[in-house]
Image: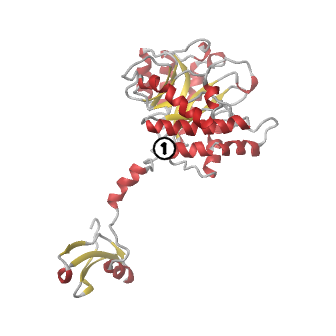
């Protein structure tokens, strides 16, 4: 299974094959046609609906703007019910202090409203290299900006929403793991959030746009990977990004911009033959190491069935621990009422099982012992 996947502007039949070939977990579609069925039924899908012309109006209204935006978008989103999550405003300004506060409030209002309708969102989605440290660069300023986003990020974690970021690189300026523009920037941002109390084990972060963008760092815009290298070299860089992101447990997807391009993004376009090359590069990587279960409320609920049922005030538990043993079973066979009540529980110490009995008449005593054997 790979984090790398496609950012799709126009759905084409071969893309489904490519996602299967890569083992992609996610996919992203911009302005997909109305359909109850997913174009990519074996992937989790993010849907972005182009709203760039109205986004600033809703963000400026803060919390109420977020609520209103979700209500406005509900008919569009309900016509595409297969999506795992729907994106909010694309690339809002998180560097200006006032707009940053409004983005946080807008995101929080949108998440609260989405919860009322049983849908999940992708929030924040700042431009690549944002929040940044200004010019001249100040790490303190960058950290301060990131910290101001924490209330929205914490809410996303608690409510099961997703956080989106963009990460690009350009040959000669930044590589796939660069800390100012690419995945290193994602890692640094998340580390600031973690230091500020965000549970990174539960954070679900989607890099919803990534790849080569020649326009970063003030260069000529709309230069894609085709302006810099052949697909073989680009595939190697994508594999490098994949390996780096696998070590960041909170990163759930890397969505490569773009496939099925729409003008003016032709220099970024990945066609079927390109994706075959990328697939070979991804398959050459060692298999991903399982990060283990997601420690969320449902997983914790499952673990509870494996716990001993212990009463901290029970006479058996107190006697077992006073004897230097650990409780090694639940209490069992408690029967009857009043004088006839009895209960049993195992203790364990020094490779020996101790069966304890409690009764109202006799109190607590050991009634049986045996040495432990492998598997017993």
Q: Is residue 372 above or below residue 96?
A: below
Q: Secondary structure at mark 1?
A: helix
Name the quadrant containing residue 354: bottom left
Q: Residue at x 36, y 58 (%)?
A: 304
Name the quadrant containing residue 34: top left
Q: Residue at x 55, y 48 (%)?
A: 200
Instruction: Name the side, left or right, on which 126 lies relative to 261.
Output: right
Residue 317, visible in the rendered structure: yes
Q: Is residue 259 above or below residue 282?
A: above
Residue situated in front as seen by the camera: 344 or 219? 344
Residue to which mark 1 is pinned: 159
Quadrant where the N terminus lies? top left
The spot of residue 46 in percent (x, y) is 48, 28
Q: Residues within 10 Å of mark 1 (few under 14, many from 20)?
A: some
Residue situated in front as seen by the camera: 361 or 133? 361
The spot of residue 125 in percent (x, y) is 60, 32
Quadrant where the C terminus lies? bottom left
The spot of residue 370 in percent (x, y) is 25, 78
Q: Is residue 60 above or below residue 258?
A: below
């Amino acid at each position: 299974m790979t984090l790398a996947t496609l950012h799709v502007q126009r759905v084409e039949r071969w893309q489904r094959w490519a996602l299967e070939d890569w083992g992609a977990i996610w996919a992203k579609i911009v302005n997909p046609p109305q359909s109850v069925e997913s174009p990519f039924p074996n992937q989790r899908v993010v849907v972005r609906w182009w709203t760039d012309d109205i986004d600033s109006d809703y963000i400026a209204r803060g919390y109420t703007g977020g609520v209103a935006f979700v209500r406005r978008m509900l008919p569009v989103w309900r016509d595409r019910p297969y999506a795992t999550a729907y994106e909010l405003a694309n690339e809002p300004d998180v560097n200006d202090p006032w707009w940053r506060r409004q983005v946080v409030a807008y995101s929080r209002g949108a998440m609260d409203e989405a919860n009322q309708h049983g849908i999940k969102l992708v929030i924040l989605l700042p431009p690549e290299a944002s929040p940044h440290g200004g010019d001249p660069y100040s790490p303190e300023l960058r950290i301060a900006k990131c910290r101001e986003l924490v209330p929205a990020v914490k809410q996303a974690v608690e409510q099961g929403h997703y956080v989106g970021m963009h990460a690009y690189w350009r040959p000669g300026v930044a590589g796939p793991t660069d800390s100012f523009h690419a995945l290193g920037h994602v890692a640094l941002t998340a580390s600031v959030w973690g230091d500020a109390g965000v549970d990174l084990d539960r954070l679900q972060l989607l890099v919803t746009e990534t790849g080569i963008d020649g326009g970063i760092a003030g260069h000529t815009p709309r230069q894609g990977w085709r302006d810099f290298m052949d697909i073989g070299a680009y595939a190697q860089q994508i594999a490098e990004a994949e390996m780096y992101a696998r070590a960041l447990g909170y990163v759930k997807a890397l969505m490569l911009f773009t496939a099925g391009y729409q003008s003016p993004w032709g220099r970024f376009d990945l066609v079927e033959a390109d994706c075959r090359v990328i697939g070979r590069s991804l398959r050459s990587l060692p298999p991903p190491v399982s990060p283990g279960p997601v420690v969320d409320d449902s997983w914790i609920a499952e673990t509870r069935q494996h716990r001993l049922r212990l009463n901290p005030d029970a006479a058996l538990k107190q006697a077992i621990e006073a004897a230097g043993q650990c409780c090694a079973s639940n209490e069992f066979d408690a029967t009857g009422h009043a004088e006839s009540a009895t209960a049993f529980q195992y203790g364990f110490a020094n490779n020996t099982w101790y069966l304890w009995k409690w009764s109202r008449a006799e109190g607590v005593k050991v009634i049986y012992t045996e040495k432990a054997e492998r598997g017993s």
